[in-house]
Image: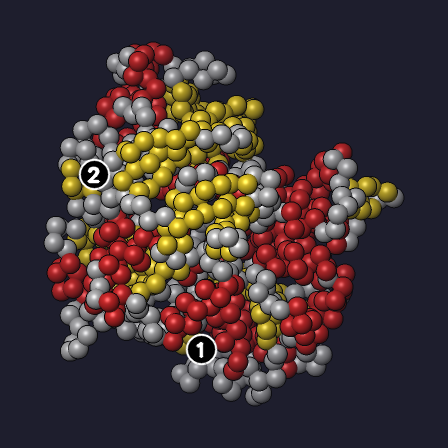
Amino acid sequence: MTGKPPSIENLLEGLAGHDQLVHVETLAARPARYATLATPLPAAVAPGLVPVGGLWTHQVAAIDLARAGRSVAVATGTASGKSLCYQLPIAEAAAAPGGGTALLLFPTKALAHDQLRGFERVQGLAAATYDGDTPQHRRAWVRRHAGAVLTNPDMLHVGILPRHEPWAGFLSRLRYVVVDELHTLRGVFGTHVAHLLRRLRRLCARYGSAPTFVFCSATIGQPGALASALCGLPVEEVCDDGSPRGERVFALWNPPLVDETAGARRSGISEAGMLLAGFVLSGYRTIAFTRSRKGAELVARAAQGALPRDLARSVRPYRGGYLADERREIERDLFGGSLMGVSATNALELGIDVGGLDACVLNGFPGTIASMWQQAGRAGRTRQRAAAVLVAGEDQLDQWLMAHPREVFTRAPEPAVVNPSNPFVLDPHLGCAAYEQPLTAADEEYWGDDLDDAVRRLAVDDRLVVHEGRAVWAGGGGAPAAAVGLRTGTSGQYQIVTGTHARLIGTVDEGRAFSTVHPGALYLHQGQQYRVERLDLAERVAYVAPNEVAETTHPRSETSVQLLGTDESVAVGRATLCLGSVEVAEHVVAYQRRKLFSQEVLGSVALNLPPTRLATRAFWYVVDDDVLAAARVAARRVPGTVHAAEHAGIGILPLFTICDRWDVGGVSTDVHPQTGRATVVIYDGYPGGAGVAELGFASGRRHLEATLDVIASCRCEAGCPSCVQSPKCGNWNEPLDKAGAVALLRVILSAP
C-alpha cells in the first residue's frame, strides 16, 4: 500500500455497497487531567515508571488508596494506564525493608505474559510468569526468588494453593493482590474466583499477611460491589477517568437483506471478513473480534480470500484451544507489527497492549455494553484517530440495537453479579480449602453462614471428616482442585487429536463436547477443517481427520425440564411468572449437514450419545388456556407459538441480565407435565445458576415488552434469525409460529 490511506469515513462509505452503514457516531477527543500523590514516591521507585507528564487523576486516586491499605477497584477506559495503579505500589513495597511481594491474576496466559513486560522498568524487582507453560525448573526459581508473580486463576487454583508450603516465604510477605479484567469475573467463572480469593486470604493469614487488593476493569456498573463480593472485603471504587482519548469513529453495520420475505441477511462473518480485508488493504492495522472459535477461523479465512497473496499472509486467526507455541507465535507477530490483521475471540479482548492498531471490527454484539467498549478500545490506544465497526448478527438483540442505535451509545454499562452461595461451586472449593488446611469455625470470616451447611453436605458425601471442631479432607487421591473446573462448571476437557501419532491440535470443555465434537462433526482449527471420525467417551478424546467439504454440521437435541420448586411467582399481565430450581435433561440425538454458504440441508445423521443432566435455576412463564383462546391460537399452533416466544425471549434477555444468549437455555411446551398448561422455561446454563434467572425474573414485564417489540417489528413473514429463529436451537427451529407469538404476547400484555 502506497500513498495516504483513505479517511475512515470514506473507507466505510466505499465498502458499504448495499446500505449496510446504519449509523456513524463520532466520539470526540478529550484532554488529560493530572493530579499529585498525597505522599511522594521514594526516589528509587519513581524513575522510569512515572510518565514525564505526571499521573492522571484516577491513577493518583487509586494509588493513594492502595498505599493506605484500602482495597480498590479501578474501572476506567481502555488505554487509561490502569497498570500503573498497581505497578507503582508494588515497586514501592518491593523496595521497602523486607521486600513486600505481589501476586497478579490475569484471566489468560497471554495477558499475563504481556503485562510482564511492564515490570521490566521496575529496578530491583524480580517479576515472573507462573502458568501451565512454565518449565518445572523455572517454577522452583519463581517460588524462591520472584517478588511479583503473574499468573491466572487456574494456576492459583491447582498449582499454588494446594501446594502452598513452598510458597510460604512469598505468601508471608504478600502485600498486594492484583486482579485484572474485573469485568470478566461474572457468573460462574466469577463465582469460582470469589472462592479462590477467599482460599488465598485464608492461607495468607496462616503465614502472617493480609494483602491489599487492587482490581482493574473496563467500565462497568458498580465495580466496587462486584470486587467486594469477589474478595469478601470492603473495596473502594475509582471510576472518573482522567486519561486523554483520541477521536474515534464508531459505525453500526447491518448486513444487507438477501431475502426480505424470509428475513435472511448476508452472513455477518462475510461482512466482518470483508471489512477486515478492506481496512488491511487500505493500510489500517485491524483486529476483528468474533463470538466463537469457529467464527474467528471463518472471518480470517474470508479476509485472506479477499486480499492479494502477500497481504493475505499478514492476517491470522487467534482463539482459545490453540497450543502454547501457536499462541506465542501469533502474539509475537502481532506485537512486532508483521501482522496487519487478526481475527480473534475475546482471548485478545483482554487488555493486551497491542500498540498501533487503527481499527476494530466486532462481528456481533459481544453481549454487554462493557465488553463492546472494551473490544472497541483495542484500536487507538496510542490516541490516534481510530475506527470501530459493530457488525450486527442476525439474532434478536443485534437487530434490536440496529433499530435503536442511540441505545448503543447511551445505555449505561451493566453491573456484573456473582453467586458465592451456589453449592455447586461452594462445596468443591471448600473441599479444596480443607485439603489446604482443615476448616474450623474461624473460617466463617471467609464463607459466613454458608460454611456450616456446606461442611455438612461434604461430610455426608464422605469428602470431609469432622473431628473436634476441625473438618479434614477425606476424599483421597491427592489434591481435589484438579477435578474442579473454573470456567465451565465441569471437571474436564476432551482432547482433539489427528493423524496416526494422535497429534494434539486442541481441546474442548466436556460440557460442549457432545454438541461440538460428536462423531461426524466438522471442526475448524487454524483455518484447517477436520471431521470427527470417532469420539472416545472413556478417554475423552475426539479423533479427527482433515476434511475440506464446503459444509457445516448442526447438532439436534431433545431437552426436558423438571421444575423442582417455585421460590417466587408474580402476575405479568395475563401470564404467571415463576422463579425456582430445575433439572434439565439434554440428549444430543442427531446432527444435520448443511451447505456452507447457502445453508441448504444435505441430510441428517442419527447419533448414539448418552444424555446429560443439569441442576440449575430458571424462570418460567405459565399461560392459561383462556389466554391462548383470547389470542386465537388454536391447539395445533401452540407448540410453534410458545417456541417462537421462547427464542425471542432468550435473544433479547441480555438487555436485562449480565449474560450472553449462549449462557442460557430454554424449553417450551404446549402442556408442561407439572404445570398442566403452556409453559416457557428459560434456564441458567450453569450448574446451580449464576444469578441470570433471578435477574430475568426481576425484569418481568419489561422483558416481555422487548420480546414482543423484536418480533412484531421484524419485516419477515414467517420468522427469521432476527426475531424467532435461534442458532443454538436443538430442534433445528421447528416448529415456529411468529404470528402466534405476536398475538399471544399482545394478549398477555393487554392486562396491567
**Where, by quadrant of the figure, is residue 153 drawn?**
bottom right
Where does label 1 land, which residue? 55
| Vertical side of 560 occupied by 654: above or below | below
The C terminus, quarter of image: top left
Quarter location, residue 140? bottom right
Question: As drawn, is 149 to the left or to the right of 569?
Answer: right
Give the x, y percent position of residue 526. 39, 57
Residue type indicated by callout 1:
Leu
Amino acid found under the numbered disc labelled 2: Ala
- For numbered disc 2, what is the local secondary structure? strand
Label number found at residue 207: none
Compared across the picture, whether 649 is left or right of 126 comes to left
Is residue 698 visible in the rendered image? The answer is: no
Residue located 22% across and 64% down the image? 307
Q: In this view, does 349 lie to the left or right of 597?
A: right
Residue 8 in view here: yes
Answer left or right for 25 relative to 228: left
Mark 1–mark 2 Cα distance, whole angstroms, equals 51 Å
N-terminal label among 1 and 2: 1
Local packing at callout 2 (Cα closer than 10 Å; few below 14, some 14-19, many 20+) is some
Residue at numbered disc 2: 264
The residue drawn where x is 60% and y is 51% is 194
The 10 Å Cα crowd at callout 1, few under 14, some 14 to 19, many 20 or more, is many
| x and y percentages locating residue 576 in the rendered image | 42, 21
